[in-house]
Image (tube, rainbow, N blue to C red):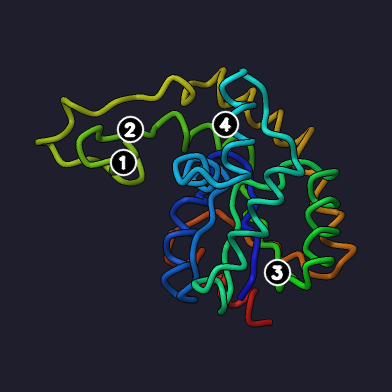
Amino acid sequence: MRMILVGPPGAGKGTQASRLVETYKIPHISSGDMLRAAVKEGTKLGIEADTFMKAGKLVPDDVVIGMILERVAKPDCAKGFMLDGFPRTRPQAQALDAAMAKAGVSLDAVVLIEVPDQLLEERACGRRTDPETGVIYHLKYNPPPADVVARLVHRKDDTTEAVTTRVQKYHSETAPIVPFYMEKGILRRVDGVGDPDEITKRITAALAS
């Protein structure tokens, strides 16, 4: 299963990604993690990306796409992969599609987790992270144990203002990739409201159809 996971901030992509890679036994390729790994390994593209990052610039799309193609060519991607965090714009989606076609790599599906804006804000603003374990709790949906409450951190970008800005950016920049993948016939829309187990079932059912 070769797929891309898409959805607005707070849609639950992280939760579903960890479940889906376990279900399909495929690697989770986060664009951010991939960039950091390439820089650390000192690959040719990693060195090139590091030059841009050190200058405070965005890594060009062609460099990121080159890294993605290198990554999906590795043995652990033989049965598939899940790409997360890229593409974020329609031009990126078009460039990635062209590069993958040239490399002989085809996508099976693009999974879109849909959640109303109002609920996204509630989900994000209630998140708290345990700095010692990295576990993310939610004050309403996944309350933390009493013994860790005191050390939990509320991220700066999980405020109402920050979430509103991120959601607006998603609608203006990332949402336009949806019709692109619809036209290709590989988009799978999934209702992201409800119990995480139920959402996982919806995704696997959509992928099986």
- Circle 4 residue: 50
Q: Which numbered mark, 4 or 2, is in the foreground of this view?
A: 4
Q: Quadrant of residue 72?
A: bottom right
Q: Earlier in the sequence, mark 3 or mark 2?
A: 3
- Under mark 4, the amino acid is Asp
Q: Which numbered mark, 3 or 2, is in the foreground of this view?
A: 3
* Circles 1 and 2: CB atoms closer than 8 Å: yes
Q: Earlier in the sequence, mark 1 or mark 4?
A: 4
- Under mark 3, the amino acid is Ala
Q: Is residue 94 left or right of residue 155?
A: right
The residue that appears at 63% across and 59% down in the rendered structure is 70
- Under mark 2, the amino acid is Arg
CA separation, marks 1 and 4?
Answer: 33 Å
- Circle 2 residue: 128
- Circle 3 residue: 109
Q: Which numbered mark, 3 or 4, is in the foreground of this view?
A: 4
Numbered disc total: 4
